[in-house]
Image: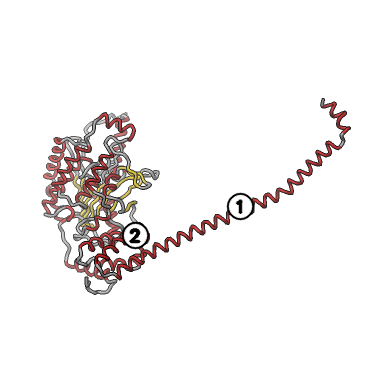
């Protein structure tokens, strides 16, 4: 067929091939002519897209600048409003508006300081109206202002996490309270706890810090609440707890734990505790687990640092108190992780089981020119296992136990601080226990055993305890008091030695 077509048909239509060649040539020619036009069109479109993107970026930046200017102007207006108003009730409302604004836009605190918000608030704090005083104290804390320490220097209380073994720390605080004649919130300027792995309820780590510092609950009431609530939270059927572990990775009821915290703590925010003039600085530590490795510590504070002062640790004061405790007590395997904003929190003891070094760092940010007077570190007991492994092999269980033990160890921090801090400044109480008590123990007889262990330990360390009480009780001298008074007046009147008329 091909031969027939090629031999007989093609001669009859001589222009067939030629026409096809011409058509192909014309098509190729038209394609060559159109290609530059297409490229030019694409170039024009890409240039237009770039111009449009640049225009949108400019508009976005302009909107941000306008918003920032608007926020800054709002800050200036709120500060100026405080300086013009004389009515006490209206002043209280204006101060609360300023606090709310600075909490929402913390970056504007620098603008407020430039507008002399600190002298204004310090003068208002001299007023006799109690609601106004409370509102002003909160506003000062939001800005980042910190009053001088209560004693000769900074007095720090750091409590290890340890679950129900926190009864050991409680007994030490009982003895110190008896020796000094003062309540715990009066003895310390800063109280910190991690609410570490397995930490629960009202006395342990961060929870104990909140009870003693913010709520100022007497130690006797704390122990009663602890025993009652401990049995409620740790009361769980083994089968039900095991099933819950399978789908929620939590043996105990996280919802019930949240309910108890809301009932006991209320809906107050961390920073609201600054309204109390006797409340020390308090913090709780959690671990953020959704930002990749390494894990990061988060500090829930009832204070803010001055603009320009940066802590090594993430954190803020705007969250509610029950949220801080819930986040810092989310022990893996015991309670579910806690979602707060865009962050996922677990137990602070994953990173910081002994918070003493963190507490010292935060104190030096708060009072950079004030020396340490007393650092009291309270452990929750140690147990030394007498079982020895073979020299050639360890089981998988032993390996995992060693990893967990090293991750939650508290004595390495103690060894470092004991070598670095000045003599007669650092005191650590952490007794050896004759029996290994689990951190979620709730049986009454075992809790009584812990209490007796602590009393025995403190009797053997009576001299050390008296020394700590003596250091804690050191008061300010007249020169220090005069210097602090002069600085306060200078801050109130921007260096002018006038006397307040309020």
In which quarter of the view is residue 95 placed?
bottom left
Report the side of 286 relative to 293 (left or right).
left
Helix, strand or loop status at disc 2:
helix
Q: Would you place residue 269 above or below residue 476 in this image?
A: above
Q: Could you say which is closer to the camera, residue 342 or residue 494?
A: 342
Give the number of callouts. 2
Q: Disc 1 vs disc 2: which is toward the camera? A: 2
Give the color scheme: rainbow, by chain, secondary structure or one colour.
Answer: secondary structure
Residue 416 visible in the displayed image:
no
Image coordinates of residue 114 in percent, x first then y, are: 35, 67
Q: Is residue 151 visible from the viewing direction of this image?
A: yes
Q: Position of residue 77 (x, y in %)?
A: 35, 66
Q: Position of residue 163 (x, y in %)?
A: 23, 40
x then y, percent, for residue 12: 88, 32
Relative depth, front residue between 264 and 329: 264
Mark closest to the chain's N terminus, 1 or 2: 1
**Residue receiving disc 2:** 101
Badge 1 crowding class, 10 Å Cα cut-off, few under 14, some 14 to 19, many 20 or more, is few
The residue sitting at the top extreme is 1
Say which of 416 and 72 sits in front. 72
Which label number is shown at residue 416?
Answer: none
Q: Distance between the Cα atoms at labels 1 and 2? A: 44 Å
Q: Is residue 59 above or below residue 227?
A: below
Snapshot quadrant of residue 291: top left
User: Which residue is tagged 1?
Assistant: 46
Quadrant into which the C terminus falls: bottom left
Q: Secondary structure at mark 1?
A: helix
Neighbour tally class for label 2: few under 14, some 14-19, many 20 plus, Cα within 10 Å: some
Q: Is residue 39 above or below residue 70?
A: above
């Amino acid at each position: 067929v091909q031969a027939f077509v090629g031999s007989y048909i093609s001669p009859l239509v001589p222009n067939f091939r030629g026409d096809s060649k011409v058509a192909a040539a014309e098509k190729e020619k038209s394609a060559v002519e159109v290609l530059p036009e297409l490229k030019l069109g694409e170039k024009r479109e890409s240039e237009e897209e770039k111009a449009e993107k640049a225009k949108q970026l400019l508009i976005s930046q302009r909107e941000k600048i306008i918003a920032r200017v608007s926020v800054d102007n709002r800050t200036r207006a709120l500060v100026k409003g405080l300086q013009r108003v004389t009515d006490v009730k209206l002043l209280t409302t204006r101060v609360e508006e300023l606090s709310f604004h600075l909490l929402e836009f913390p970056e504007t605190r620098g603008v407020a300081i430039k507008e002399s918000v600190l002298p204004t608030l310090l003068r208002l704090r001299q007023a006799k109206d109690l609601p106004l005083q409370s509102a002003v104290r909160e506003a000062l804390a939001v800005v980042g202002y910190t009053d001088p320490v209560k004693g000769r220097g900074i007095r720090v209380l750091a409590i290890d996490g340890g679950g129900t073994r926190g009864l050991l720390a409680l007994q030490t605080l009982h003895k110190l309270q008896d020796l000094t004649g003062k309540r715990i919130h009066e003895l310390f300027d800063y109280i910190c706890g991690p609410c570490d792995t397995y930490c629960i309820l009202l006395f342990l780590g961060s929870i104990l810090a909140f009870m003693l510092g913010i709520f100022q609950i007497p130690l006797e009431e704390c122990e009663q609440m602890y025993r009652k609530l401990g049995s409620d939270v740790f009361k769980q059927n083994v089968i039900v707890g095991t099933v819950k572990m399978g789908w929620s990775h939590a043996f105990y009821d996280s919802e019930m734990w949240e309910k108890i915290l809301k009932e006991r703590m209320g809906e107050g925010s961390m920073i609201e505790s600054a309204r109390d003039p006797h409340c020390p600085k308090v913090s709780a530590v959690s671990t953020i687990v959704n930002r990749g490795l390494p894990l990061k510590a988060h500090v829930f504070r009832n204070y803010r640092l001055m603009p320009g002062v940066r802590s090594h640790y993430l954190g803020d004061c705007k969250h509610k108190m029950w949220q801080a405790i819930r986040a810092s007590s989310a022990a893996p395997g015991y309670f579910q992780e806690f979602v707060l904003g865009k962050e996922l929190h677990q137990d602070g003891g994953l990173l910081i089981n002994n918070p003493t070094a963190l507490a010292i760092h935060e104190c030096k940010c708060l009072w950079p020119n004030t020396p340490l007077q007393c650092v009291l570190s309270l452990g929750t007991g140690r147990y030394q296992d007498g079982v020895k492994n073979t020299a050639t092999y360890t089981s998988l269980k032993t390996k995992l136990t060693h990893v967990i033990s090293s991750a939650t160890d508290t004595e390495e921090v103690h060894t470092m601080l004991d070598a670095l801090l000045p003599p007669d400044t650092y005191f650590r109480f952490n007794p050896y226990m004759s029996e290994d008590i689990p951190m979620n123990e709730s049986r009454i007889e075992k809790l009584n055993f812990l209490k007796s262990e602590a009393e025995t330990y403190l009797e053997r360390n009576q001299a050390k305890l008296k020394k700590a009480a003596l250091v804690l009780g050191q008061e300010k001298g007249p020169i220090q008091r005069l210097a602090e008074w002069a600085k306060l007046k200078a801050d109130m009147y921007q260096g002018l030695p006038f006397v307040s008329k309020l």
